[in-house]
């Protein structure tokens, strides 16, 4: 067995929490979200994709004081917010709250890099992953993968991805400013992927996230 994956297997022990249904999973996410609340500004990273939409609908039903939050995304397609592929646009339409919109830091903002630099830490970070082992918009075959891992900047431009539009992603350094990272995985095949040995295979981006952020990482799954 590859020693790299032996180490990952050890790191995953006690990291995966399984829930019997989506309602219980979304409630557990909400509890984590509420626990992250600070007296002053609470800094939050959210993720796009289908998996967290039920959680966002739950957030939309709550009487939350959004002006006490800074909300941003782990990644975004480099399209206008009214485009059907925009994570920002989709999430804003689900939350449907003007104060939420006012608290939102768009990754497409020309000042986004500086705004993120000014955030010392994030108190809640929600990520997903793809079947190719990507998280945020950090893909295994992208040409600037090493920059995504090692660059000191907060954001990186991604020229490729699926769907095939340019993207903007937080670097691993920026995501690692989080006090707590919750990796939401509803698909059993994805759980099997991160738990597999993959002997003689190159490490995937998700392996890098797990190894670098293991002390703050929790995996929420259905099962």
Image: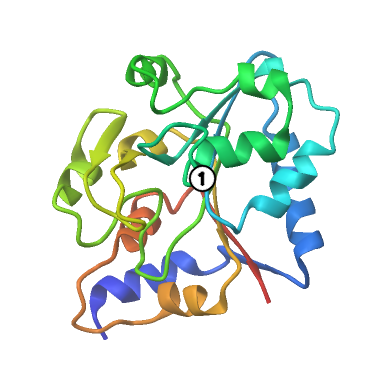
**Colour pattern of the rendering:** rainbow
Rendered view: 197 above or below 213: below
- Quadrant where the N terminus sits is bottom left
Which quadrant of the figure has residue 125? top right
Q: Percent from the top left, x then y, of residue 89?
A: 56, 36
Q: Position of residue 171 (x, y in %)?
A: 31, 39
Provide the residue designation for mark 1. 84
User: Compared with residue 118, is residue 73 higher up or lower down, i.e. above or below?
Assistant: below
Q: Horizontal and vertical percent for residue 222?
A: 67, 71
Q: Nearer the viewer, residue 141 or 165?
A: 165
Residue 175 in the figure: left or right of residue 95 = left
- Nearest the eye: 177 or 215: 177
The reply to whether residue 142 is visible in this rendering is yes
Please count the marks in the image.
1
At horizontal 48% and vertical 73% (from top left) the residue drawn is 190
Q: Which of 18 and 143 is in front in this view?
A: 143
- The image quarter containing residue 147 is top left
Residue beneath the point at 44% across and 40% down: 74
Q: What element carries label 1?
A: loop
User: In terms of depth relative to the viewer, which is nearer, 100 or 114?
Assistant: 100
Give the residue at x 66% y 37%: 93
Q: Residues within 10 Å of mark 1 (few under 14, many from 20)?
A: few
Q: Is residue 38 visible?
A: no
Q: Where 78 sits versus 196, above or below?
A: above
In-image side of 73 versus 134 (left or right): right
Residue 9 lies, with reference to residue 175, above or below; the image says below
Q: Residue furthest front?
A: 83
Left of 218 or right of it: where is 142? left
Left or right for 24, reference 141: right
Query: Residue at point 31% right, 37% down?
Result: 173
Q: In which quarter of the image is the C terminus?
A: bottom right
């Amino acid at each position: 067995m590859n020693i790299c994956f032996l180490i990952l297997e050890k790191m995953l022990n006690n990291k995966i929490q399984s829930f019997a249904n989506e309602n219980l999973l979304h409630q557990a996410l909400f509890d984590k979200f509420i626990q992250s609340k600070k007296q002053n500004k609470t800094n939050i990273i959210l993720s796009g994709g289908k998996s967290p939409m039920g959680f966002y609908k739950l957030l939309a039903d709550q009487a939350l004081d959004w002006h006490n939050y800074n909300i941003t995304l782990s990644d975004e397609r480099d399209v206008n917010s009214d485009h059907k592929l925009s994570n920002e646009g989709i999430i804003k339409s689900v939350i449907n709250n003007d104060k939420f919109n006012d608290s939102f830091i768009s990754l497409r903002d020309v000042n986004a890099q500086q705004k993120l630099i000014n955030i010392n830490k994030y108190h809640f970070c929600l990520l997903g992953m793809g079947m190719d082992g990507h998280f945020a918009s950090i893909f295994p075959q992208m040409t600037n993968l090493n920059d995504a891992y090692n660059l000191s900047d907060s954001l990186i431009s991604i020229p490729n991805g699926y769907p095939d539009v340019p993207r903007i992603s937080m670097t691993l350094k920026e995501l690692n400013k989080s006090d707590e990272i919750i990796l939401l995985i509803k698909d059993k095949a994805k759980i099997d992927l991160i738990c597999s040995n993959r002997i003689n295979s190159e490490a995937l981006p998700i392996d890098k996230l797990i190894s670098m952020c293991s002390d703050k990482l929790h995996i929420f799954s259905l099962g």
